[in-house]
Amino acid sequence: MNAQQVILRKMTPAEYGAATEHREAESVRVLSRLMPEEVARERVRRGTATFLPDGLDTAGHHLLTAENAAGDAVGNAWVGPDPHQASGSASSAWLYDIHVFVPFRRLGYGSAILTAAEALVAREGRTALGLNVVGDNEAAIALYRRLGYDVTSMSLRKTI
């Protein structure tokens, strides 16, 4: 497979709305395994309000659309301050979300978006990019491992 390349640009308001809707629906789907759906929906809504109080224009956050060489939007990403570090002194950034649109999956765009996000973080003087991944998302885990990401913590759960 040829290595894809993307250009990251700020999302338009319409793209931000669609990305938020998708991210929140996916988050509710995952959290609903652990709690009632209505509780999950409220938790996700509060999370968006907390982390993106000014939406698309929240300071320190990059809400990005990835375009390929043909100018097609192939996915998006949300990169911002590492929530595990004190603001103002953080040496790392956080990948809150990455999404490759269905027609462009399994073509190398996930790697391209992540590589472009890493370059953005490096240009800002940060030395690391952290992220969370759902434990059963084997494709994403394989991507992150292939690109050199290491496990830094792990949470396990068993329903009994």
Image (cartoon, rainbow, N blue to C red):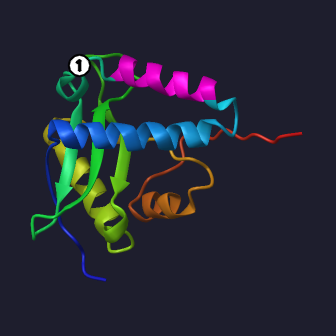
Q: Which residues are magenta?
A: 38-51
**Which residue is nearer to you in this view: 104 or 149?**
104
- Picture layout, residue 112 above or below residue 34: below
Q: Quadrant of the C terminus?
A: top right
State left or right for residue 65 relative to residue 95.
Answer: left
Magenta: main secondary structure equals: helix
| Quarter location, residue 71 | bottom left
Q: Residue at x 44, y 63 (%)?
A: 143
State left or right for residue 16 relative to residue 31.
Answer: left
| Image position, residue 103 (x, y; %) | 33, 70
Q: How many marks?
A: 1
Q: Amino acid at mark 1?
A: Asp
State left or right for residue 80 relative to residue 143.
Answer: left
**Which residue is nearer to you in this view: 12 or 118?**
12
**Which residue is nearer to you in this view: 95 or 38?**
38
Query: How packed is label 1: few (under 14 Cα within 10 Å), some, or many (20 or more)?
Result: few
| Quarter location, residue 88 | top left
Determine the secondary structure under disc 1: loop
Determine which residue is flagged by label 1.
54
